[in-house]
Amino acid sequence: MVETSSESWQLPAEAAAGTLVSARGIELHGPWGHVFGPLDMDIGAGGVTVLAAQAGAARTALLMTLCGRMRLSAGTLAVLGYDNPTRILAISAIACLNELDDVRPSVTVRDMVTEQLRWDSPWYKFVPRASEVEVSNMCAETFGDIELPPLNAFVDDLPEIQQLLLRIAVANTKRPPLLVVGRIDKIADDLERAALLQRLVALGEHQSVITADVNALPPDTGVHTVVNMHGLLGAGDIGVMTEGR
């Protein structure tokens, strides 16, 4: 049986103060111009934080920046006490951004889980193709009471909520202190979007979770913080998505 237990994460003393993100004057410029900023942000650790902002490359780039996947053009950023993008990258996971984890139509659930098991294992260890047991071990905590996907199903054929939860589960096997999730407002079905948000709230009991949504959130969602960034983030420059990682 393969377990997906949390690692022991060593964080700077500043993280004990309860600050997840501290940003001052952060800006990002791509090869074709301005993407976002300057922005100041303070986000507390724990629970789910939703960045309320227009969908587009600027919002995507900000999410990627907050977990160390893109380097700023100006300003200072600290995440859980770290200000080095390489260290931020090491304590975070990111899921459901097509620029990073899009899944080909020919990929099955077994393929995705097997590949991640092999990435997580020592190079010298033989890892056979995943069975339903490994799928359950990797995905059960993320899916909660939502039905797990069939082992041999093509990921592209799954209901949208199963696709997204599978991508989150695969990205989050090491349970780092920070989990960043995009695409929540791309779910067309209101009930599925609410169910996905509740699964993030459940994960937020043990991690800090950042996601984004253009929609107004209904009351009693369990979200820790909503950061209103409407008017601060525009559509952005899609050219940045292939530069500066």
Image: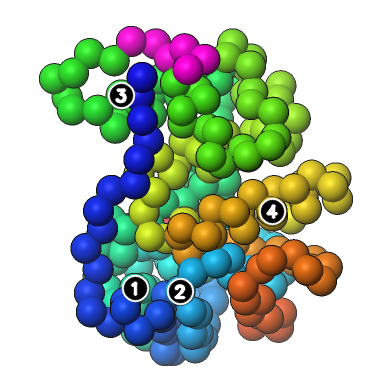
Query: In this rendering, which labeled residue sits more in front, label 2 or label 1?
Result: 2
Quadrant the N terminus occupies: top left
Contact between labelled residues 1 and 2, with CB atoms less than 8 Å apart = yes
Secondary structure, mark 1, is loop
Residue ID at (48%, 85%): 42
Q: Give the answer, above or below, for where 234 lies relative to 87.
A: below
- Residue 45 — which label? 2
Q: Quadrant of residue 166?
A: top right
Q: Give the answer, above or below, for where 68 lies relative to 168.
A: below
Count of numbered labels shown in the rendering:
4
Q: Which stretch did the figure color magenta?
A: 128-133
Left or right? Give the position of 135 relative to 178. right
Badge 4 or badge 1: first in the primary sequence: 1
Cα–Cα gap, marks 4 and 1: 24 Å
- Residue 118 — which label? 3
Residue named by callout 4: 198
Cα–Cα gap, marks 2 and 3: 31 Å
Query: In this rendering, which labeled residue sits more in front, label 4 or label 3?
Result: 4
Secondary structure, mark 3, is helix
Query: In this rendering, which labeled residue sits more in front, label 2 or label 3?
Result: 2
Residue named by callout 1: 80
Contact between labelled residues 3 and 4, with CB atoms less than 8 Å apart = no
